[in-house]
Every structure is written in structure tokens, then in C-alpha cells.
Amino acid sequence: MKLLKYSGLVLAAAAYTGVVPGKGPAIEVKDLTPKFMTFYRAANAEHASPDRRFQLWKEDYDFAAVPPTAEGDRLARAMPDKAWPNYPPVITRIEKGAAAIEPSPQGELARVVDLLRPGKPIHLRLIVFVGGFENNTFTVGENGRATVAIPVEEDAHDLGPAMAEEFTHAVRIEIGADAGGWVRTVGETALDLGLALRVTQHLYPDRSTASFLEIASESGWLAKAKANRSAVLRDVRTAVASDRSEDVMRFTMGKGPSGLDREAYYAGWVVVGYWLQHGMTFAQIARIPEGEAPTMVRTAIDSMLTEQ
């Protein structure tokens, strides 16, 4: 997911340290867990009230995986309070910082690169941060460079698939198919999400589809999406060319017109699956420019609705 709100965080290469060694794609690492621990220890030492705790969070940490919108501001304010009781059981893992990320980020990136075949060296930036247990890894692009952010507090069981998804987004940014910004069409959003999910399915064939499609959704989301497949596809088709922030928000984090949340995820999953079934490769889909995504997604949806 491409969501980012940060303050005081420089994404320049000089801000990153600890290049992961080895052959193949390179990863530069920025570890934000020490900043989080400064906040956490100060809040505990003061027995801080929720308002004071948020003030310390802003002063010492101020990093949340939320969209750069008014709704994102609201989510960021609520996150420390909601997550606070859940930190003690995982604080040892948080203290380990980047060393706690398993499986190897470079190994996961190499598997994605082998599948997408970018045809150029890939050199990513990785931020290790502490979130609010939202299972919200994310990727952003800046001047053709990709930055992937991984929350260290999450169960290691889920981090492999999460990295596969985000590294798929990152490779598309690195090859110039996607700019990696929040402002993008609903069609490009669906394509990018759908490809990342299908790559994850390919690399983790032992995992159930629901295990990575239903992250951050209510249980039973996939069954509900399948039951409303045509309606969801029509919803996304109608908005496919829109790049309004409120539409991107509605189809990725809110409820779409059919009442299903995260409709772009399901529509992208179905569309990319359709392309794969009709002979396109992962590498070919990865190279679809974001400017062509709305037309291609619309055409695929029209074909699927006609074939029903």
C-alpha cells in the first residue's frame, strides 16, 4: 500500500545507513526504532496521559503510515492511544530494530526481481518503523527512487508476504512504470495492488488467498467481495480514470459504492488474474505505464463483465 505521512524525515540517500551486503539488488536501511524507543521510554517514565503521550510522540517520533490527508491526520492522532496496550509484549522485538526483520529483505527482493525481470539494477531504500499494529507496510516513490517501509512490531509470519507486495510496488517505481505518489488514478491503483497481490500468491503458494487479501479487512471480506464481484468491478470501472484523492481513499481505505471496503484491492486482484490467465506475464504487467493503466483496466473489466 502506498501511504505515507512523515515529518522531518529526509528521503535522500544520505539519510540511509547500513547497506545490506551481498550480490543482487541492494537495499539501504534507515531504522526509526531508536526514535520510537525514545518516545516510549519517556511516556512510560512520565506515566503520561493520552494527550501528553501524543505530544511526546510528535516530539520524539512523529511517523505514521497514513495518507497525507485530513483523514490521515485523524488516524495518526488515534494511533498511539489505540496501540499503546499492545506494545509491551513485542517491545523486545522493537528494541532489536532492523535486525528483527525476517525473512531477509534482500532475499525477498531478489525473488521479486527474478519474477518481474526489471532489466536494470535495483537499489531500494528500506525504512524500519514502529506502527500501530495495522499491518500497513507501504511504498513511496521520489524522483524514480523507491522507498519501502516495514513495521517491525508485526508478526514475522506476515512479513515475508508483506515484503513481496511492497517490493513489487518498488520495482515498478524503479523501472519507471509508476511514480509511487499518493495522487494517481484509481485504475493505476488497482493495477499496482493487483499485481503485488498476485506476485505474493505466486511466491507464497502455501498461503491461503484470504491470508494476504484480508489483511486490514474484516473477516469474511473475500467471500463478500466474490459475492459482489460484478458490482465491485463496475464501481472501479466508473472511477477508473479519477485521480482525486477522495476517490483513491474511498477505493483503498474506505467503503466503495457497493459497501465493500478496499474495492480497488479486489478489482485489481481479479483484473491481474484475468491478464495472467490470458497469457500476459508478471514482467509484462509490471511494465504497464501508469498513464495506460485506466484504459487497460477498463478494457479488462468490460471483457470480464461481457463474458459472464
Image (cartoon, grey):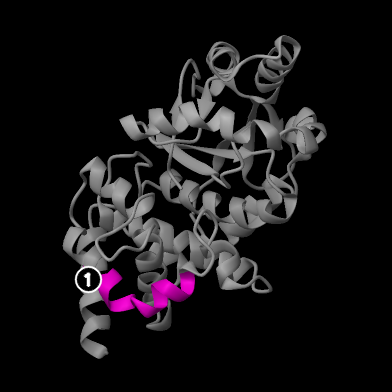
Residue 136 among magenta residues? no
Amino acid type of disc 1?
Arg
Looking at the picture, tell me which residue is in the foreground, 187 or 224: 224
Considering the whole magenta stretch, tell me its main secondary structure: helix
Q: Secondary structure at mark 1?
A: helix
Residue 42 placement (x, y as % from top left): 70, 12
Question: In this orientation, does residue 69 appear?
Answer: no
Residue 131 placement (x, y as % from top left): 59, 35
- Identify whether 171 is placed above or below 217: above
**Magenta-highlighted residues:** 222-234
Q: Say few, some or many: other residues with alpha carbon within 10 Å of mark 1 (under 14 / 14 to 19 / 20 or more).
A: some
For disc 1, the marked residue is 234
Looking at the picture, tell me which residue is in the foreground, 124 or 211: 211
Q: How many numbered discs? A: 1
Residue 247 placement (x, y as % from top left): 24, 49
Residue pictured at 28% horizontal, 40% vertical: 183
Residue pictured at 62% horizontal, 58% vertical: 161
